[in-house]
Amino acid sequence: MAATTRRMAPEARRAQLLDVTSDLVLREGYAAVSIDRVAREATIARTVVYAQFGNLQGLLEALLERTQQRAIEQVQAVLTGTGVRPDRADIDGLIVEAARTFGEMVLADPGTWRLALLPSDGAPSTLRERTEESRRAIRAIVQPVIRWITVERGGLEGVEDELAARAIVTLGEDAARLMIADPEAYPPERMAAFTGALLRTLRS
């Protein structure tokens, strides 16, 4: 049966095709993605996919860019939404709240985080570059907060904010993997409780 093309606004069509591509990657990996396959999954003509993205590389790069943007925006929302800023006194409470909020965001949008944390096997060569770009951007958001915490909280003598930001991003990625793989065993509350216990240890 020939594919049909339903009328859809260009932005809505682009989002639809990126959603289809994301679902396909998460189910079967990057190797399964082709213009033909995406068009079949979306039940549209191949020409529509080409019109939106130019070619397969353009499609995959657009997906990586959207994933990167969503992940960065969510990390920013964690820090601004929980009030992690110098005019708040309960620093440990803010950190615990940020850990809980991050976990809730991961579970609310697991597709974005599964895609962001996928192994690079079979992925386009730009994936590693995009992934590292995302990490750098997230570290740039986290590092000033670490610097402030180091100064204001105490009990962190000798902690370098750059290395601490790298460690926290790595721990955050691992926590996201655990929560996505087994949300019942690793709920946000458990991650928040562990964060609180670790902070108490650093006080001693």
Image: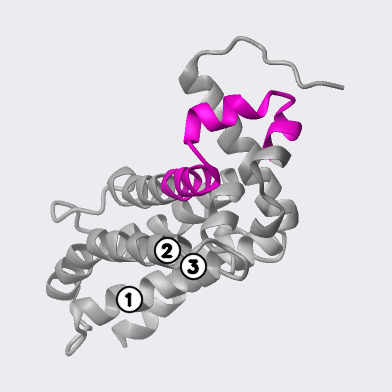
Q: Which quadrant is the C terminus positioned in? A: bottom left
Q: Secondary structure at mark 1?
A: helix
How far apart are the two marked residues, 3 and 2, measured between alpha carbons?
12 Å
First in residue order: circle 3 vs circle 2: 2
- Residue at horizontal 22 percent and vertical 77 percent from the top: 162
Q: Nearer the viewer, mark 3 or mark 2?
A: 2
For mark 3, does the 10 Å Cα neighbourhood hold few (<14), some (14 to 19), or many (20 or more) residues? some
Q: Nearer the viewer, mark 2 or mark 1?
A: 2
The quadrant where residue 108 appears? top right
Amino acid, disc 3: Glu
Q: Which quadrant is the N terminus positioned in? A: top right
Residue named by callout 3 = 173
Magenta residues, as a range? 38-67
Give the prevailing secondary structure in the magenta stretch. Answer: helix
The quadrant where residue 120 appears? bottom right
First in residue order: circle 2 vs circle 1: 2
Q: Is residue 38 visible in the rendered structure shown here? A: yes
Position above or below: 134 against 156: above
The disc placed on residue 23 is: none
